[in-house]
Image (spheres, helix red, strand yellow):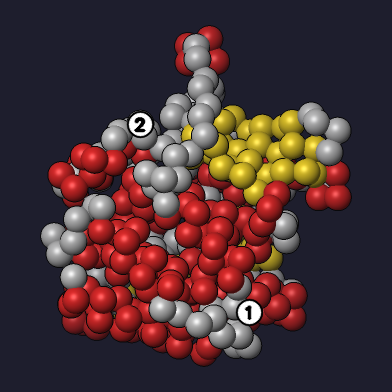
Amino acid sequence: MVKNISVLGSTGSIGCSTLEIVRNYPERFRVVGLAAFRNIDLLESQVREFAPEVVALYDTAAAQELSRRLEKTEVLSGPAGIVRVATHEDAGFVVSAISGSAGLIPTYEAIRAGKTIGLANKETLVMAGPVVKKAVSEHKATLIPVDSEHSAIFQCLENRTTEDVRRLILTASGGPFHGRSPDSFSSITAEDALNHPTWSMGRKITIDSATLMNKGLEVIEAHFLFDFPLEGIDVIIHPQSIVHSLIEFRDGSMLAQLSLPDMKGPIAYAMSYPERLDAVIPACSLPEIGTLTFDRPDTEAFPCLEYAYDAVKAGESMPAVLNAANEMAVDAFLSGSITFRDIPVIIKKVMDAHNPAPLVDIEDVLMADAWARAKFKEILEDL
């Protein structure tokens, strides 16, 4: 049976990998919706190849240009257009791959529409965990993780109860600066930070990997996604990126999920769940890999990981504030406004200035996000 899918963020890394899977398994999947930010040329190519029923670009000017090129295709624009793709009535599966907080509302609306969602946008749960989990329950939606680490945990937990699990252990590559002295961090350029040793990802998530904030956000996501106590979620450094995550049972035994670092693996698993597709990625040859190493994260050099734990402990709106401050800091670093070393410093200042408030609905989340962005700008001016 063919599964109809909508892809939010179709021109990004996850979106392109998703469409490669559709291309390789046309008997299994059909694209009914595509949404992107403003990459007109790539989206035009995707529309011509996959012939979706609905198309949207966040950028209005870009949408108008794409509409001119695709005269027979209605091209929607703005946040409402992206939501239309996310909630399209024919879409049985929605890939949520829009980067950052921009993916929150479309994903939330897909949840409210009762969709099954392949969740690559971790900010949905980081920013609005309690609100999102309530909506999932009320609207009988389903979240299947696409992040390699959460997919690994999901696979290890399949047909098991978390009552027997003592720890969830997320692995991190350590990024390009693992083992580097913090004294040299001020000289790190954006080009240095974007040079990830094992994964090919978007710019924002690559910087987050370099600061270990990405792993911090994944800790928060795992806490909400698996309803698991924060104190039972650990992070270890694994530079080879072969072991994607582990679970430790209460009897001391462990299960791990291993594969080559290729996002098509977890994407395809989410798309085909509970089945598996044939030959999605090359098999993992352990004799050729030879050595797998593990280390503890250096939270003194990379404090962003600890800030994520602190945000969950503070609760309420603090994770949303952490996320917004981090997004602003990454943008400022990539534009040259701050140094790599400034990223955790400013994030901490924003968090210290915030008084956590309850998250009753999605508007509360957006208010916390807006507050953090305004506070970041205020602090940046005083640097």
| Helix, strand or loop at mark 2 | loop
Q: Is residue 85 above or below residue 242?
A: below
Q: Tell me the tag on residue 179.
A: 2
Is 373 drawn above or below residue 158 in the view shown? below
Of marks 2 and 1, the one in the foreground: 2
Q: Could you classify mark 2 by the number of other residues whose Cα lies within 10 Å: few (under 14), some (14-19), or many (20 or more)?
A: few
How many residues crowd mark 1 within 10 Å: few (<14), some (14–19), many (20+)?
some
Which residue occupies 80% across, 37% down?
249
Q: Is residue 210 visible?
A: yes
Is mark 2 in CB contact (under 8 Å) with mark 1?
A: no
Give percent across and percent down for residue 292.
52, 20
Q: Quadrant of residue 383?
A: bottom left
Q: Name the residue beneath numbered marker 1.
A: 131
Question: Residue 253 placed where, x, y %?
Answer: 79, 29
Q: Which mark is residue 171?
A: none
Q: Please name the amino acid that badge 1 sits on.
A: Val
Q: Quadrant of residue 377?
A: bottom left
Name the residue rendered at 29%, 35% in the picture.
Answer: 181
1 lies left or right of 68:
right
Q: Which residue corresponds to the image point at 21% horizontal and 65% vertical from the top-left?
A: 332
Dot 1 falls on a residue whose secondary structure is helix
Query: Residue at coordinates 53% horizontally, 88% vertically from top-left?
Result: 364
User: Is 211 left, or right, of 113 in this rendering?
Assistant: left
The number of callouts visible is 2
Q: Amino acid at mark 2?
A: Gly
The residues tagged by marks 2 and 1 sit, at their Cα atoms, a distance apart of 38 Å
